[in-house]
Amino acid sequence: MRFRIEQRPEPSASMRIAAPVVATVLTLLVGSAMFAVLGFDPLSTLQAFFIAPLNSMNGLSELLLKASPLILIGCGLAVGFRANVWNIGAEGQLIIGAIAACGVGLFYPDPESPLLLPLMVVAGAGAGMLWAAIPAFLRARMNTNEILVTLMLTYIATLFLSWLVHGPWRDPAGFNYPQTALLPAAAMFEPFDYSYRLNPSIFITGVAVLLMWLFTDRSFLGYKMSVGGAAPLAARYAGFRESAAVWTGLLAGGAAAGIAGMAELSGPLGQLSPQISPGYGFAAIIVAFIGRLNAFGIVLGGLLMSLLFLGGETVQMTLGLSSSLTRIFQGILLFFLLAADFFIFYRIRLIPEHA
Amino acid sequence: MIPRLELRNISKRYPGVVANDDISMTILPGEIHAVLGENGAGKSTLMKIIYGAAQADSGEILCDGKLIEAHNPATSRALGIEMVYQHFALFESVTVVENIALAVSGAFDLNALAAQITELSQRYGMPIDPWRRVHDLSVGERQRVEIVRCLLQSPKLLILDEPTSVLTPQAVTKLFETLRHLASEGCSILYISHKLDEVQELCDSATVLRNGKVTGTARPKETTAIELARMMVGSKLPEMHVTPSVRSEKPVLTVRSLSAPAGKSGIALSDISFGVHGGEIVGLAGVSGNGQAELISLLSGERLHRDTGTIEIDGKAVDRLDAAARRKLGLTFVPEERLGRGAVPPHSLSQNAVLTGHKAGLVRRGLVDRGKANGFANAVIEKFKVKANGPQAAAQSLSGGNLQKYIVGREITLQPKLLLVSQPTWGVDVGAAAFIRQTLVDLSRAGAAVLVVSEELDELFEICDRLLVICQGRVSPPLMRTQTNREEVGLLMTRIGGNNETGRSGPVALQN
Amino acid sequence: MDLFLAIFTGTIIAATPLIFAALGELVVEKSGVLNLGIEGMMLMGAAFAFWAVIAGLPMPVAIVIGALAGAAASLLFGVLALTFLTNQYAAGLALAIFGSGVSAFLGRNFGSSPIDALKPVHIPLLSDIPVLGPMLFRFDPLVYLALVMFAVISWFLYRTKGGLILRTIGESPETAHAIGYPVIKIRYMAVLFGGLMAGLAGAYLSVAYTPLWVENMTAGKGWIALALVVFATWRPLRVLLGAWLFGGMTILQLQGQALGLAVPSELLSALPYLATIVVLVIISRNRQILALHFPASLAKPFRPAS
């Protein structure tokens, strides 16, 4: 028997659903093998990684708390990815959003104003967009590769944050720790229940998911951007502007990341420190791809990725395994997922030797 | 005599289509053998199989009596089989000699090879400079490079795929001389074409294909064109109804002293002026690569330039308007590239309706109306007899001809005031081509202005009221179709204005 | 004079990992493939080479192990991008994340003590020449290897048939396939070579440049190498010059900090990243210059028609 790979006349609908499932299963298999090689019992380690975190209300609260920024940013990035606008600097936009929100929270004249929290949302979104506007401008007007610029700006944002919390914004009463003062209560999202950390900022993510669905499935703007991504010459033929897609894509990602940064600050953190994000901005790229750049897929991808983060923390605490396993899992999952996508568009056909 | 090449029962299927079905043929040494068939008959697939660029599903190929097994282009060349592609297999970014070095084995000595190229190209009467970059060559020169590349291998069998589609009538004569010269030296030639007159002039024997099957063999010089055509098409050729045109008073499209610097393909446009009126079809003839692509992208708004007042639609200057804004003024456009420009390959036909149909009520309040888009796509599919699995079929799943019908149908259904069409019937079968041409005529007779860009002179002579000829970025004054002929247009295709290349000047029946 | 010498030699050394990584990526991109995962491959190379040194293997072996780790990582990318026709941006990003995870995981037990760094050469006579000796003849062997690689790659790309094939595959894989070259196989080789070079770059960082394990020790150098290829408009000599420019930027920043300039250290640290953006903008503005040596099929998936 020989085999041949051929293009399907139509993308396969069933493979579209099966691919992520198969990829997840394969990731788990490779993960088990990896644990076995490291000398841990695969089943109990997988249990610790993927099941234990979900065994309690607190676990579920943490799952949603971590999934929320991932989904939010994933939605924002997917807007651009659909048009081949590669914003991979969401991490930097998140940091800048958090910085701007923190500035408002710390220095707004009336620390008890009910306006404080909404203002911080606006500041976070605005600052994220501003940071993303730099690569947007450079790509749209100067033809500069946005991948590299967004990434360089992330390093710069990280250094800027470090300077702020080590220098001008350092809490004088903070025992020289590199962090700002705690935000006033009015600048914080009040948790649903003080036993857990989940807070109403998750509704912002809910709205973002709905907007994303409307954008991809129904809107003409979303249609235009998907044309630009799939066939740039067709977009030009129809008169859809590339620069509009660049701006929309980058600003959407910047706004989402900026809000996510603000929500982290006004949610679980309460103050600015150099460790504002455990890499949400990068993980959200994977979330967007796992979700196939579509709203509900991104929700599932965000939950899965959040579980990977939680699992990484759990095995670190219970088994003493490094949390860098999380990144390995993320990478493997993305590898399998991308490879599995191949079978949506192609199939393998066996050819008998004597045809 | 042992045949140079023998095909036995070759079959090849692609998903959804049988490209070659049980094809057998024999070519003798020194024979010029035609493979005749209309677009989509399976000629190109068959040639790729012979050359090894594609593998047959079943069947045998024998060269000089020996069975060829597990073959690819490299082994074919080792056997002395060479191929000149319809779309040239040349790399633009490197020089002629580097291109040729890629195809020949032996030491990598560019200087020696360049000398060889110069010598050989002189001997066969088609001089080329080995040190020029292919990017800077005209289409005709590129074909010379291809042929010289093949000749360097002293081939036993030379395959040419539609070699004249890029040549002027005068250059065709020159090419035929070279081919006869080669055949007299014992080289077999496999000549693929859909042009009857050329095959009758050049070829000793012919195999005719239709829908992937052999429908006949003939000695073209002893067979009438009508018989050959019947074998090719299988039924009576459809007839056209062209009523006299009634031109609108004012032109719908006016082009005034349009000049533009060289674009990617390196052809600058200089001082182009013409008008297209409502109620008429104007054809733009010319060998491809003479500025058609640049002109059409400037007219469609895909490319903008700095001057103003050079292009007007309905009396309105549009130089600074992008494609979407020009469409609002009543322009629609069928581009040469169907996949990736005229349609988004992975999108469904229904989604592809929205691409240009969005202003026709398919989008409301910023949201796409899927029901209407489906309806629109369905209407086009039915009216233009597009073979597709309904409006949800992906554009890339359609055959080239069917996608062409869909795009032409979409642009016509939008009821344009001005329609630009590039190569309206490329890859479309004869019946559908006639239908598309008739629809263009009907559209113009209903009052629209139509500009057709085509490399097929026959097509232009069939449907156009006036003809323009483009050469080296210059456009001739308009010729009335009824007062000109192919020879005159052919001459203009090689020289317009001051740039003398080869031809002599002759009387030209210009309008006015 | 001492300061000048420090800046000069520091620049050459700081540029070395960039030269390896960017030259490797240049070859990959010339074949029409865009591998964004340099950072991940470098980190793999750094971690595995460091591990080999700790495990007591001889230095040359450790460096080879680092290079092979980079190549192995690139193979993951190659399978995705070349066999499974994945979006090359996504596959490269996946590799960047995966590589950083693997390197961090491997490095969790490396501790914080330095290892014995790769020793500089001592060439009798040459190294002892005053001024010129310390300037040119007292580097570690990998610095010279980087220059040799530059010469070899320039020669290969523009003076050999192999290089011609590679470049033309980068222009049009369809045409290369049509005249009978094994496009996918050649692209695999290019990708593996790129991985080897990135692994070498990473190994240089961990066993020669800063012989001390720090998680994420590349700190964006992989991405800067990518930018360098654009900056160089896909020409080897300009990669070399660009790497020295960026190396110089890094050294100036370190010297600035050492001299206690009255500027925040973060600002100085941000300089190379800022410079990358500025340089990219300047280069990208002129599309014609970019187009001249740009591999036209870059990042476009290709599958040979059968």
Image: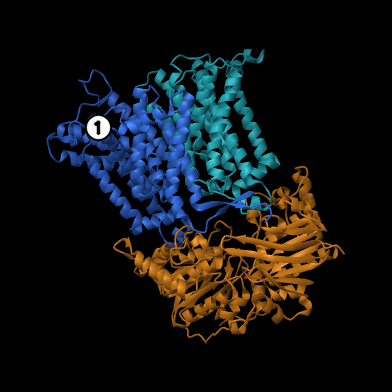
Chain colours: A blue, B orange, C cyan
Q: Is residue A196 visible?
A: yes
Name the subunit of mark 1: A
* Among the 4 quarters of the image, the one containing residue A326: top left
Q: Residues within 10 Å of mark 1 (few under 14, many from 20)?
A: some
Q: Relative to B9, is A309 above or below?
A: above
Residue at coordinates 39% horizontally, 52% vertically from top-left?
A245
Q: Give the camera-side residue of A89 and C126.
A: A89
**Which residue is drawn at the image coordinates 62% and 75% (left, top)?**
B457
Query: Which x, y percent locates residue C10?
Result: 51, 21
Q: Is residue B195 above or below residue B100?
A: below
**Relative to residue B31, is residue C233 drawn left or right?**
left
Q: Residue at x 78, y 58 (%)?
A: B62
Picture coordinates of residue A292, whole percent (x, y) = 40, 48
Q: Residue at x 57, y 39 (%)?
A: C28
Quarter holding residue B212? bottom right
Residue B205 at x, y percent in the picture: 78, 72
Q: Is residue B481 left or right of residue B174?
A: left
Q: Nearer the viewer, residue B398 or C294?
A: B398
Residue type, mark 1 in image: Asn
